[in-house]
Each structure stands twice: as structure tokens, then as C-alpha cells.
Image (tube, rainbow, N blue to C red):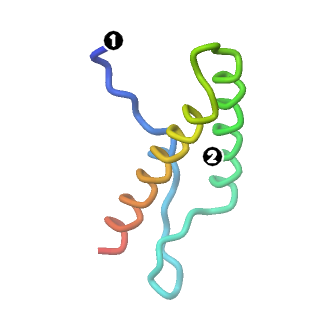
Amino acid sequence: MSDETVQPASGQLNIISATDGQACIPAHDVVLLLRAIASSCRNLADDPGCDLHSAAGAIDYEADNIDCRAIHHTK
């Protein structure tokens, strides 16, 4: 097991404020995130030790990171 901390890809997304103060992610960044998720799913599909639960866990990790960043952005 590695001591290296995995950094979420979603940490690179731009979070901006909409006119109503809500946190938003530009469409271009959403497309990049979706492509990163697709790439990760393809990589996991080639690993016999991984299944859809592994992919779902990775997606949840990214979603949690975006949620935390959005909350922090609107404070």
C-alpha cells in the first residue's frame, strides 16, 4: 500500500459564483470531468480486481470533493 495521497481530479475544476451566489462549474470543466471519469472506468474495466463498486467509489470521491469545494466557495 502506498503512502501517497490520491488527489481528486475534480480539484482542478474552476468553481465560480453565479449571479444568485450559487457555486457553478463551467460547462467545459464538466466535460473534462466526465471524460476523466470515463477514462477511469476504462482503466478499472481492465483490472480484474475492480468492479462497478470500485468505479462508483471513485465517482463518489470526486463528487464529495466538488461538494466540499462548492460549500467553501459560497462561504
For badge 2, the amino acid type reads: Leu
The secondary element bearing badge 2 is classed as: helix
At horizontal 63% and vertical 34% (from top left) the residue drawn is 52
Residue 30 vertical position relative to residue 56 in the rendered view, above or below: below
Quadrant position of the N terminus in the picture: top left
The residue that mark 1 highlights is: 1
Q: Residue at x 42, y 53 (%)?
A: 64
Q: Looking at the picture, which amino acid does disc 1 mark?
A: Met
Q: Is residue 52 above or below residue 10?
A: above
* Front one among 6 and 50: 50
Distance of label 2 from label 1 (alpha carbons)? 27 Å
Residue 21 spot, x, y in % from top left: 44, 83
Residue 58 percent location from the top left of the image? 52, 38
Q: Which mark is residue 33?
A: 2
| Earlier sequence position, callout 2 versus callout 1 | 1
**Residue contact between numbered discs 2 and 1, judged by CB atoms under 8 Å:** no
Please give the count of numbered marks on the rendered protein.
2
Residue 74's x, y, as percent? 36, 74
Nearer to us: label 2 or label 1: 1
Q: Under tag 1, what secondary structure?
A: loop
Is residue 20 placed above or below 30 in the rendered structure?
A: below
- Furthest toward the bottom, the residue is 20
Few, some or many C-alpha atoms within 10 Å of disc 2 (few <14, some 14-19, many ≥20)? some
Quadrant of residue 7 within the rendered picture = top left
Q: Which mark is residue 42?
A: none
Residue 31 in the figure: left or right of residue 11: right
Which quarter of the rendering shows the C terminus? bottom left
